[in-house]
Image: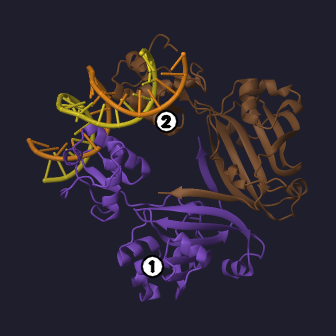
Chain colours: A brown, B purple, C orange, D yellow
Amino acid sequence: MTMNSVSLPAQADLRLPRYQLIRDDIVRRIAEGQWAPGQAIPTESDLCTAYEVSIGTLRKAIDLLVAEGVLTRTQGKGTFVRRPRFDSSLFRFFRFKSADGDPVQPTGKILDRKVLKPSEAIRAALQMKASETSIRLSRVRLIDSEPVLREEIWLPRHRFGALVTLPLDEFGDLMYPLYERACRQIVASAKETLTVEEATSEDAAALRVNVGSPIIVVQRVALDFAGTPIEWRTTRGAATGFQYQVDIR
Amino acid sequence: MTMNSVSLPAQADLRLPRYQLIRDDIVRRIAEGQWAPGQAIPTESDLCTAYEVSIGTLRKAIDLLVAEGVLTRTQGKGTFVRRPRFDSSLFRFFRFKSADGDPVQPTGKILDRKVLKPSEAIRAALQMKASETSIRLSRVRLIDSEPVLREEIWLPRHRFGALVTLPLDEFGDLMYPLYERACRQIVASAKETLTVEEATSEDAAALRVNVGSPIIVVQRVALDFAGTPIEWRTTRGAATGFQYQVDIR
DNA sequence: TAGTGGTCTAGACCACGGC
DNA sequence: CCGTGGTCTAGACCACTAC
């Protein structure tokens, strides 16, 4: 892979350390799609030449991006744009099990799709203009054909237009690969907020629990590499069996 | 501050990178109390001399410890052993408020103290020998004299002997400063596990909620700088108003 | 002013992956 | 074998803190 033309944008604030300018420039190239997830970026030696810095400075910039989870390094192979795994999502702690006791990933099924004006809260969270419309998806996730999670997903229509007409049975089990495949939208990070509510009658009917039993509610905003919010989602599931672990320092 | 005698322990695995050996040695010195929380460690220049490495290698070792939250650096002043803040504890998300709506920190009150043999699970979690005994504390935390959290704390007696006789009204509101003051035990990190249960009749009576309403249960194991577990604790509180936020990459 | 950490250089040699 | 990232050197100058 080759660098194309100029190394650093002219409008960068030159008072910042050079490793910071380089970090920002690499993020910009990834966000613009010059370097795609799963692909290798140029070698350290090439980047040193392009940015006109020594290896120590360049490595400091890359160290930052590795610590942020944007890049991964493999000795002997290269440095790659990381494909986010979302292993740290709260929902890996739901410890779902199939009938025979083995852990499984739930399947996904879209129940409803509408093009709607978002509420003011969702419009603001997705940084959409007042005139824009959005796509709302209602989704259920199942294990052994039993519903375990209810999801409501809001997407800005101008980024996800392809999903307005895609047949509902072609959505598949995972949304983020779909976003990438059908809309070239890549989720790079997310913010989640966990709360506990009592099951509504709708929760009770959909999740087969009693009204008033505890429900975990996870509200997520997913961001692209540039930090722009592209998806708003809430997920609801029975609190029974839920477990969340965290290390504190 | 001066380095005392030998730089690296002889039994270290010399196949590891030098910055890793230095990192481990600094952690060892902190765990042994040679360098105490809040105090400065020797300057980078001194450490380079003592460990016989160049500044780049030494800084890599310190970078690791800063990233781990063990050290903090201040330009012009020095590098300091960090006093853990526990800001990331799940319980900062309980968003407690006093009657006038201002956020407050709950006070603490010890209800009961006993010297007991721990259950097998707690004995194992605290890495205690079968013959050792422990101190069990029952504690309640209050806001405006209203109980909001129930806590059960188990401590190995051989580390916390001073707490067996200390008058209960001298425990104060915060346990970790007490541990440091009365027992010279410093909590450096912790692991927490969050689950949701339905309120028992005891929860209902103590926390003034209805039986069966959702309760957040946080089970914590606190560790010293050497990574040895020194405290086992569960905290229970009403799930209403609880909120937990996390960033995912 | 003296001392601290913050940034940066221009190389070197080593370990690993793939051909 | 060559190219990759991993480790390490022996300095330099700068920015900030305290006196």
Question: On the picture, is B143 further left or further right than D1?
Answer: right
Residue B143 visible in rendering: no
Residue B180's quadrant in the figure? Answer: bottom left
Above or below, A221 relative to A46 = below
Q: Say which of B210 and B101 sits in front.
A: B210
Q: Residue at x 72, y 40 (%)?
A: A232
Percent across and percent down for residue B148 are 62, 74
* Amino acid type shown at disc 1: Gly
Residue B67 x %, y %: 42, 47
Asked if marks 1 and 2 touch (Cβ < 8 Å), the reply is no
Which disc, if any, is residue A40?
none
* Chain of the residue under the numbered disc 2 shown in the image: A
Task: Identify the residue under disc 2.
Answer: A66
Q: Is residue A236 left or right of residue B82?
A: right
Task: Identify the residue shown where x is 49% and y is 83%.
Answer: B131
Determine the secondary structure under disc 2: helix
Q: Is residue A70 visible?
A: yes
Task: In this rendered view, identify the residue nearer to me: A74 or A17.
Answer: A74
